[in-house]
Amino acid sequence: ELGMIRFDRDVLREGEQPDLVVIEFAVNDEGDETKGDCYESLVRKVLKLPWRPAVVLLFSVFANDWNLQERLQPVGRQYDLPMVSILDAVTPQFSGKEQKRVITKNQFFYDNLGHTIMADCLEYLMEICDTSDHARVDSFRQGMTEEEVLEQCLRGEPAIGNSFEKVKLLDRRDGYEGASM
């Protein structure tokens, strides 16, 4: 919920219009009372921004080789978004034999090499996107552009929920008539 309401203040501050938004809420939100409703609401809010930024879903991983990607992947599939799983990228080699390891679990989680690997995974996705065909196969079958397909998805039922899509953060700096803070 906190990430959902801080989006406007922290990402779009001072009129910023990012071309790319990476959304990652995959490890600390197991106890999320909304069970992913806030997550999908945020994804939908970003997809509806007037300048249409690209959206990537990033699923980082806990030291116990766990994350929420199984719960949240339906959102990525619903809107045909690229998804990067750090769990899938690194955990298989953690349990391998010493000779096959590229990095130890301690190096990944405690020496900040994990951030470098996550950046490398995102960079690899960008390289793949840059060299691939840009049109969805579905768009040819449906006779619609990718933008029209996305608009149709956004008008349809959400994968998990969209109850928080229009939530806004109000604080003392905001002069809202009839509200006292």
Image: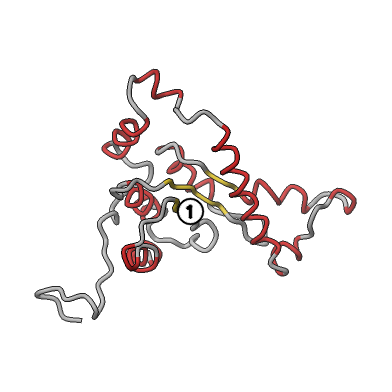
Secondary structure category for the residue under label 1? strand
The picture places residue 90, in percent across and down from the top left corner, at 70, 51
Give the labeled residue for mark 1.
22
Residue, far right = 99
95 relative to 133 in the view: left or right? right
The picture places residue 95, in percent across and down from the top left corner, at 79, 52
Q: In the image, is residue 79 above or below residue 19? A: above
* 68 or 78: nearer the viewer: 78
The picture places residue 60, in percent across and down from the top left corner, at 59, 56
Circle 1 crowding by C-alpha within 10 Å: few under 14, some 14–19, many from 20: some
Q: Quadrant of the N terminus?
A: bottom left
Q: Quadrant of the C terminus?
A: bottom left
Q: Which scheme is used to colour this image of the protein? A: secondary structure
* 21 or 78: nearer the viewer: 21
* Residue drawn 21% across the image and 75% down it: 174
Q: In the image, is residue 112 above or below residue 158? A: below
5 relative to 28 in the view: left or right? left
Identify the amino acid type marked 1: Val
* Residue drawn 38% across the image and 50% down it: 43
117 relative to 97 in the view: left or right? left
* 25 or 6: nearer the viewer: 6
* Residue drawn 42% across the image and 51% down it: 19
* Residue drawn 28% across the image and 53% down it: 163
Residue, far left = 178
16 relative to 155 in the view: left or right? right
